[in-house]
Image (cartoon, rainbow, N blue to C red):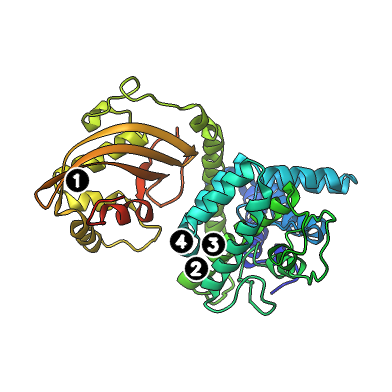
């Protein structure tokens, strides 16, 4: 593994495409006055210089950030806020590194983390600990750092133990690297682990600014409850999430043998890269536009929408509409359609297998009626609905209130923001099925 993140394979591949693109652009520029085809090729490079400039900024920023901040307990990671990274680098270069660290601490203890927290649902080892993660988040927002920090340290250690199948995060020889990763580069998580795992033998009341595992969990560092310690603990958790995703990606997509591409292949790859990059920018811009919409939405049942109704009675792309669709499919025993609305956090989906699983859970529980009681938007992509249901089970009617926790996603399983169109609100399997499946209905 290279000493620099900017030498990661994905960066290097893009860089080589840019080099090939320069040759293509130079040739096309020469022939453009004489050839409409060459002019068309040149038009494809309209934003080439801007993309090249932005790529250089993106590829170099993780190394620059780690250079200034890794010794202070902050590292670059895939799901980090890139604008914040660039701002902190600029502050550090201007000699205002303490101001930059203040911004990092504020960011990693704020509501802005909700988006990164929702991304942990895709990793089973984190999903098992969702209740604890949520508790740590609530404590952090309330500035109860004294309880949030130990909880985060336990989550971090246990999650890495489950992922590695043998060793926790703070064990010296745990391999925290992954091919083509920012967080799991040798200058990232491994270095951060070494800092946080230092021996703390003496009891002290002096304020600390690192989430030292040994000192905090063994009761030696008594003055740890501040936003810097909590923020660095959260960053570590998110970086581990990015590491786990890199391991999964590398497992699903083995390394391909490197071949030198032809000029034609380089141009084709570059055109695809530019097109994908431009689409990605538009998607991010649209997501940013809607990012705050969910905070303002506080729907009132029987005023903004009916408590009971058909699917057409509810606005498109809202959690209540998809909730009603699911509940109506339950009434109709349409297990295949129900299965399509379950969020499985996996790329592997077999409709027959999932429909059978849904049937096993629901077929003896006949939904007679339902009533939406409330809708609460907890994050840009997450909503909770409280629903009163009347269910006939073993010839007995049960009246219960259930919570449907839902995640807004597109067809590719990527999280979306409330206000964007084209997605579907899916039910988080672990939050719903185990409750419905309890035979005594005491949930």
Badge 2 or badge 3: first in the primary sequence: 2
For marks 2 and 4, the one nearer the N-term is 4
Q: Residues within 10 Å of mark 2 (few under 14, many from 20)?
A: few
In primary-sequence order, the first of circles 1 and 4 is 4
Left/right of residue 142 with respect to residue 406 in the rendered view: right
> Distance between the Cα atoms at labels 3 and 4?
48 Å
Q: Position of residue 314 (x, y in %)?
A: 29, 28
* Disc 2/disc 3 C-alpha distance (Å): 32 Å
The residue tagged 1 is 330
Residue 128 is marked as 4
Marks 2, 4: nearer the viewer: 4
> In front here: 199 or 255?
199
| Label 1: which secondary element | helix
Residue 248's label in the rendered image is 2
First of labels 1, 3 by sequence position = 3
Mark 4 neighbour density, 10 Å: few (under 14) some (14–19) many (20 or more): few
Labels 3, 4: front one: 4
- Label 2 and label 4: CA atoms lie apart by 17 Å
Indicate the secondary structure of the residue bearing disc 2.
helix
**Place of residue 23 in the rendered image (x, y in percent of width and height, measured from the top left):** 66, 57
395 or 175: nearer the eye? 395
Above or below, 184 against 412 in this view is: below
Residue 235 seen: yes
- What's the mark number on residue 264? 3
């Amino acid at each position: 593994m290279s000493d620099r993140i900017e030498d990661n394979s994905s960066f290097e591949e893009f860089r080589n495409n840019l080099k090939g693109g320069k040759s293509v652009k130079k040739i096309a520029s020469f022939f453009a006055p004489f050839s409409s085809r060459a002019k068309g090729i040149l038009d494809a490079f309209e934003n080439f210089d801007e993309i090249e400039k932005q790529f250089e900024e993106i590829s170099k920023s993780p190394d620059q950030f780690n250079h200034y901040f890794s010794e202070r307990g902050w590292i670059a990671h895939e799901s980090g806020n890139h604008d914040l990274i660039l701002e902190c680098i600029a502050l550090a270069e201007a000699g205002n590194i303490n101001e930059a660290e203040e911004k990092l601490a504020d960011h990693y203890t704020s509501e802005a983390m909700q988006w990164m927290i929702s991304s942990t649902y895709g990793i089973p080892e984190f999903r098992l600990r969702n209740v604890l993660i949520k508790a740590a988040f609530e404590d952090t927002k309330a500035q109860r750092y004294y309880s949030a920090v130990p909880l985060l340290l336990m989550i971090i250690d246990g999650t890495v133990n489950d992922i590695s199948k043998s060793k926790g995060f703070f064990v010296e020889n745990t391999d925290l690297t992954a091919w083509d990763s920012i967080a799991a580069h040798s200058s990232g998580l491994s270095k951060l682990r070494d800092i946080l795992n230092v021996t703390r033998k003496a009891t002290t009341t002096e304020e600390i600014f690192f989430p030292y595992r040994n000192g905090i969990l063994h009761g030696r560092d008594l003055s740890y409850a501040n936003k810097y310690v909590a923020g660095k603990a959260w960053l570590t958790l998110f970086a581990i999430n990015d590491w786990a995703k890199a391991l999964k990606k590398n497992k699903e997509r083995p390394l391909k043998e490197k071949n030198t591409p032809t000029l034609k292949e380089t141009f084709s790859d570059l055109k695809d890269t530019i097109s994908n990059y431009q689409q990605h920018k538009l998607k991010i811009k649209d997501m940013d536009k809607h990012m705050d919409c969910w905070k303002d939405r506080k729907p009132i049942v029987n005023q903004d929408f009916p408590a009971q109704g058909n699917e057409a009675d509810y606005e498109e792309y809202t959690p209540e509409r998809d909730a009603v669709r699911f509940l109506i499919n339950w009434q109709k025993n349409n297990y295949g359609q129900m299965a399509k609305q379950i969020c499985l956090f996996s790329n592997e989906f077999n409709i027959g297998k999932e429909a059978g699983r849904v049937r096993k859970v629901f077929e003896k529980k006949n939904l007679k009626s339902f009533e939406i009681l409330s809708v609460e938007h907890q994050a840009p992509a997450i909503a909770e609905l409280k629903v009163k249901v009347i269910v006939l089970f073993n010839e007995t009617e049960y009246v219960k209130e259930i919570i449907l926790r839902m995640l807004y996603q597109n067809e590719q399983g990527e999280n979306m923001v409330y206000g964007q169109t084209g997605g579907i609100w899916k039910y988080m399997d672990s939050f719903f099925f185990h409750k419905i499946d309890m035979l005594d209905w005491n949930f």
